[in-house]
Image: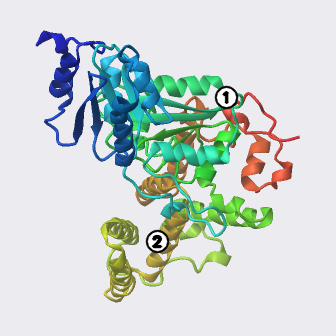
């Protein structure tokens, strides 16, 4: 019994390897661990694989080639080399550590033990179940590619490689999770990405000590990015290969986690979350026009209802030209409480829409419009102005390109509403100041979160405000400290 429990390397004795695989891995116990034993040139070999994540036809072809060895070969002393040549696959490696063999087996590769040999053959025949690349729902564009990342890390790296055919593109595979052993790929361009950032990302990933990454990329970022109780996203997620490729070429580091269709872009800033691929699929003027309206919508989602509430509570602040602002009918509930209740109702509807089957989504929208928009006003629960401003603020939330940022902005808006409700003008100013200070003090991978506004970078801020035409973008963003600053001459 002690022979296989302390087994560190592949044993020459096939029975010891077999006992280890049965006891430690569950071969012949777990129905999905496949096992075949063959006699090749009067020697035993054993083949192990995991059903469901391997290509069955490739395994059948390999078995056929191995069995035919008995008909065409006779030199038993060269059996190991003969088997190696008979493994019809583009990726065949030899491994002598039993733990590595096990990890590769559970990742979807087949393992072949040869009696009398201390090396096992590992053949890559992975065929993970999954869907075809398709356009992500949250990042649709009018013009542009319709493919998107999938849950298969191999396909995802292939989509990036298709766009960046640079020999210096690096896809380094790491493994996280003592039990899940999840594949994590770090993508960057060797002579562009800052070496300090790359090493920092890899070091943080390698230090993660956890059983498994069930929630994939989200769990990974929480484990090596210091979130605490900060609601704002300190990394950027995207499901679009063109967006990921653009950032890699700009000097960013991209992390792909197997089983997740979202990749992680690092480092990132507040303003990175306000850009959208659609702006780069239109002419520079149209892209700039679109970005301005998007920024306006984000500002409205943050400050519209708190500012309107401030004017309602302190009408003396309004100039004569804007004296019409304010509720004509106050209803039976105080205005501040109406705004809070309306925002809560919108959140209820958002969460309900997530769990509502698509065919019923239209019906849910009609119910929301009737119940909240019409009946609530009719019975005097809400005033029409409250519904109007809450609706505009909600639209601004959905215009925000980053879903994570939009949810975090709701928390800031609620904070400003409460500060204004209880302390009036002073409360609004204090709340606004505290929010700015909070953003300014955030850092992600040693990168200031509110760059390029603080610290101020005029060129970078101009690039954000205006969608600069491609011929005039000569350098990469300075915030990632790329090795090669020049994008084009």
Say which quarter of the image contains residue 487. Answer: top right
Residue at x-position 81% and y-position 52%: 470
Judge whether 258 appears above or below 177 on screen.
below
Residue 407 shows in this picture = yes
Q: Picture coordinates of residue 59 (x, y %)?
A: 35, 41
Residue at x-position 36% and y-position 17%: 119
**In this image, 385 relative to 478: left or right?**
left
Element under disc 1: loop
Q: Picture coordinates of residue 66 (x, y %)?
A: 36, 33
Q: Which residue is mark 2?
A: 390
**In this image, 195 relative to 63: left or right?**
right
Q: Which mark, residue 205?
A: none
Q: Picture coordinates of residue 344 (x, y %)?
A: 34, 66
Residue 306 shows in this picture = no
Which quadrant: the N terminus? top left
Q: Nearer the viewer, residue 182 or 391?
A: 182
**From this viewpoint, which residue is outermost toward the bottom?**
378
Q: Nearer the viewer, residue 458 or 352?
A: 352
Judge whether 403 appears above or below 172 on screen.
below
Separation (CA) of disc 1 from disc 2: 48 Å
Label 1, residues with CA under 10 Å away: few <14, some 14-19, many ≥20: some
**From this viewpoint, which residue is outermost toward the left?**
1
Which quadrant: the C terminus? top right
If you read the primary sequence from the N terminus, does the residue marked by circle 1 or circle 2 appear first? 1
Q: Which residue is mark 1?
A: 190
Judge whether 347 appears above or below 408 on screen.
below
Residue at x-position 59% and y-position 41%: 268
Label 2, residues with CA under 10 Å away: few <14, some 14-19, many ≥20: many
């Amino acid at each position: 019994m002690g022979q296989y429990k302390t087994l560190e390397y592949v044993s020459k004795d096939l029975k010891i390897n077999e006992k280890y695989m049965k006891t430690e891995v569950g071969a012949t116990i777990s129905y999905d661990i496949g096992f075949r034993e063959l006699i090749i040139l009067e020697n035993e070999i054993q083949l192990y694989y995991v059903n469901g994540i391997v290509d069955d036809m490739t395994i059948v072809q390999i078995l056929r080639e191995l069995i035919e060895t008995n008909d065409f070969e006779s030199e038993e002393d060269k059996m190991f080399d003969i088997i190696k040549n008979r493994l019809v696959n583009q990726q065949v490696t030899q491994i002598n550590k039993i733990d590595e063999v096990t990890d590769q087996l559970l990742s979807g590769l087949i393992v072949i033990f040869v009696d009398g040999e201390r090396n096992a053959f590992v053949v890559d025949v992975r065929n993970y179940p999954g869907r075809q690349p398709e356009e992500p729902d949250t990042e649709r564009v009018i013009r542009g590619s319709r493919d998107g990342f999938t849950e298969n890390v191999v396909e995802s790296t292939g989509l990036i490689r298709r766009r960046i055919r640079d020999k210096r593109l690096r896809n380094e595979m790491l493994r996280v999770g003592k039990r899940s052993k999840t594949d994590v790929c770090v993508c960057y361009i060797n002579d562009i990405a800052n070496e300090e950032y790359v090493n920092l990302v890899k070091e943080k990933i390698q230090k993660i000590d956890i059983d498994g990454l069930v929630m994939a990329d989200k769990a990974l970022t929480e484990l090596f990015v210091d979130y605490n109780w900060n609601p704002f996203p300190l990394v950027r997620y995207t499901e679009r290969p063109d967006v990921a490729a653009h950032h890699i070429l700009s000097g960013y580091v991209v992390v792909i986690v197997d089983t997740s269709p979202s990749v992680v872009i690092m480092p990132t800033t507040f303003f990175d979350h306000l850009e959208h691929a659609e702006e780069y699929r239109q002419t520079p003027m149209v892209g700039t026009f679109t970005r301005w309206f998007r920024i306006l919508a984000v500002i409205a989602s943050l400050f519209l209802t708190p500012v309107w509430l401030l004017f309602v509570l302190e009408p003396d602040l309004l100039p004569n030209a804007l004296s019409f602002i304010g509720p004509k009918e106050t209803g039976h509930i105080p205005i501040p409480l109406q705004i809070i209740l309306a925002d809560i109702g919108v959140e209820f509807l958002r969460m309900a829409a997530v769990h509502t089957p698509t065919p019923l989504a239209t019906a849910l929208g009609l119910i929301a419009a009737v119940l909240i928009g019409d009946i609530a006003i009719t019975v005097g629960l809400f005033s029409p102005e409250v519904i109007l401003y809450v609706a505009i603020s909600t639209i601004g939330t959905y215009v925000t390109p980053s879903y994570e940022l939009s949810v975090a902005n709701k928390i800031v808006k609620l904070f400003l509403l409460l500060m204004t409700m209880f302390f009036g003008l002073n409360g609004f100013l204090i709340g606004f100041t505290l929010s700015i200070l909070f953003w300014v003090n955030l850092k992600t991978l040693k990168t200031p979160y509110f760059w390029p506004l603080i610290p101020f970078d005029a060129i970078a801020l101009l690039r954000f405000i205006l969608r600069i035409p491609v011929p005039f973008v000569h350098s990469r963003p300075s915030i990632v400290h790329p090795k090669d600053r020049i994008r084009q001459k």
